[in-house]
Image: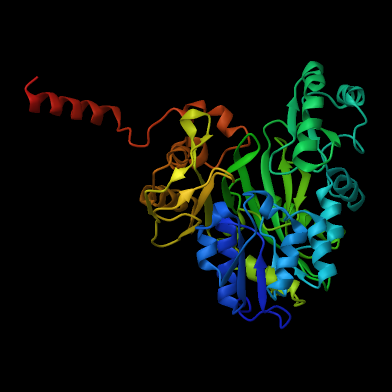
């Protein structure tokens, strides 16, 4: 497996402001505790009783606005300075991919635990990222060379590369600002809608066009880079199980790749990171088409929600490595010291009702039971009695399971899901159990259209007994009552 990661941080970092909330804030606080670093949390009035507030060494209120409090970069950095912090960890979401936060940190003498503002800009702007990858020789999906001027230009290009096409927000992310268009009429209707979405969500009206890769597999590569020019990969993850471009289940490594494909895509991930002189943790995302060809999609210049499964198969603590890199230390590992072992699956436990179009289902957690046992990890922000607020993302926990083989990790996933109890709100737990029962998933043969191909997954009850058992129970009830 190679040497274990250093427990001691750089001498530069003694105290970190965690500029986020929820389970990722708890995750960073735990890394700080293991490294002997003081953690400082931030919270809004709505998050006063949140778990990250309880776990951190210190906590500071950032106001009554439940969302805006986490988005005021100047105020958050000022707070970091006033609290005596050396560094700031942005987590994911909120300001994590905003280059201005990194710039403000630099001006105020706060170490930003993430890539440089230049790298964030280069990879956050999808058209600039495409251009950089083309120059580096990383394959990209055919599409516009830059941002589109208007709908007419989009229609002209779509005729050239052929339908279906994907209309995307240049500054987009997280599955937002994306529309698949199967015809000219759809493209014309979607254009203004995507521009409007992009403006509201990302503050930019710029959009671009790509050829739609039909039913691809979504493969991403975890990379780490330091300021000394060292870049390594921690293998790949398969994020093909998704709904409306939102990931639901993630797997590491991909059970669908050959060793040759794995070497190819991981090599491309490292090349992409080196091209933009990337430092810290990042993820390079690819689409794998039906012919086995990889295409660069985007790079996420932050810690990913699904970093957990990479940690499980490699033994590398990615958050601690982020902190060490930001503190000026070289990578703790060479590429030849990174080995993978077994398979890991992450289930996103969202407070949503799958039988009602995944409508968010917020409220009080009346009872919560965390699963355990060999190969089981839970990253959560909930506890019994916690009032799950309606202002944020609906994810309340991440259940991660690991085992040596694909069949065993599926069996462990089923057992752990059944062990987990979240009462008071509806969650996606039973939905995940149904996914595990499908022949395609068990046979490691799925793509991004998996949910569309299985509409029956939203019509179920996890407690539904087999038909013969149900009949037996009904007969027993009738016999008992003498009916």
Q: Position of residue 423 (x, y in %)?
A: 38, 45
Q: Which of 103 and 334 lies nearest the eye of the viewer?
A: 103
| Count of marks, rendered view | 0
Please give the name of the residue rendered at 62% of the width and 69% of the height, measured from the top-left corner: 40
Please give the name of the residue rendered at 38% of the width and 61% of the height, measured from the top-left corner: 373
Q: Position of residue 320 (x, y in %)?
A: 64, 71
Q: Is residue 410 visible?
A: yes
Identify whether 319 is placed above or below 15: above
Q: Position of residue 67 (x, y in %)?
A: 65, 48
Q: Is residue 224 visible?
A: no
Please give the name of the residue rendered at 88% of the width and 50% of the height, measured from the top-left corner: 137
Quadrant of image for the N terminus: bottom right
Identify whether 249 is placed above or below 148: below
> Would you say 191 lies left or right of 13 here?
right
Q: Position of residue 351 (x, y in %)?
A: 49, 42
Please give the name of the residue rendered at 60% of the width and 73% of the height, measured from the top-left corner: 32
> Would you say 141 lies left or right of 308 here?
right
> Please, which residue is most extreme toward the left here?
482
């Amino acid at each position: 497996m190679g040497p274990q990661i250093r427990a001691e941080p750089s001498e530069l970092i003694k105290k970190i402001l965690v500029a986020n909330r929820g389970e990722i804030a708890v995750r960073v606080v735990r890394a700080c505790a293991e490294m002997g670093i003081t953690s400082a949390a931030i919270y809004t009035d709505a998050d006063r009783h949140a778990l990250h507030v309880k776990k951190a060494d210190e906590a500071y209120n950032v106001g009554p606005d439940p969302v805006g409090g986490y988005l005021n970069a100047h105020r958050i950095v000022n707070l970091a300075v006033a609290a005596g912090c050396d560094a700031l960890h942005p987590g994911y979401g909120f300001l994590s991919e905003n280059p201005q936060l990194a710039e403000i940190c630099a001006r105020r003498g706060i170490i930003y635990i993430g890539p440089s503002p230049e790298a964030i800009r280069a990879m956050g702007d999808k058209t600039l990222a495409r251009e950089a990858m083309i120059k580096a020789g990383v394959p990209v999906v055919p599409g516009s060379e830059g941002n589109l001027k208007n709908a007419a230009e989009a229609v002209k290009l779509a005729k050239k590369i052929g339908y279906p096409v994907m209309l995307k927000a240049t500054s987009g992310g997280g599955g937002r600002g994306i529309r698949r268009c199967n015809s000219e009429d759809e493209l014309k209707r979607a254009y203004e809608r995507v521009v409007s979405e992009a403006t509201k969500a990302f503050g930019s009206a710029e959009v671009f066009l790509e050829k739609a890769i039909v039913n691809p597999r979504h493969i991403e590569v975890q990379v780490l880079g330091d300021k000394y020019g060292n870049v390594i990969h921690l293998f790949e993850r398969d994020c093909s199980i998704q709904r409306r471009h939102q990931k639901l289940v993630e797997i590491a490594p991909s059970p669908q790749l050959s060793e040759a494909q794995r070497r190819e895509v991981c090599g491309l991930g490292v090349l992409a990171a080196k091209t933009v002189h990337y430092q810290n943790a990042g993820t390079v995302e690819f689409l794998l088409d039906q012919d086995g060809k990889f295409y660069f999609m985007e790079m996420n210049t932050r810690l990913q929600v699904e970093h957990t499964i990479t940690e499980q198969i490699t033994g590398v603590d990615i958050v601690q490595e982020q902190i060490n890199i930001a503190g000026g230390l070289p990578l703790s590992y060479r590429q030849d010291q990174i080995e993978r072992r077994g398979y890991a699956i992450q289930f996103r436990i969202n407070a949503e009702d799958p039988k009602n179009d995944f409508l968010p289902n917020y409220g009080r957690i009346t009872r919560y039971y965390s699963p355990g046992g060999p190969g089981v990890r839970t990253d959560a922000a909930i506890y019994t009695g916690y009032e799950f607020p309606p202002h944020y993302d609906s994810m309340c926990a991440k259940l991660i399971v690991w085992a040596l083989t694909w069949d065993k990790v599926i069996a462990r996933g089923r057992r752990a899901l059944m062990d987990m109890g979240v009462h008071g709100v509806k969650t996606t737990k039973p939905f995940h159990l149904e996914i595990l029962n499908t022949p395609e998933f068990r046979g490691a043969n799925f793509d991004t259209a998996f949910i569309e191909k299985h509409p029956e997954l939203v019509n179920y009850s996890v407690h539904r007994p087999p038909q013969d058992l149900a009949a037996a129970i009904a007969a027993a009830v009738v016999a008992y009552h003498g009916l």
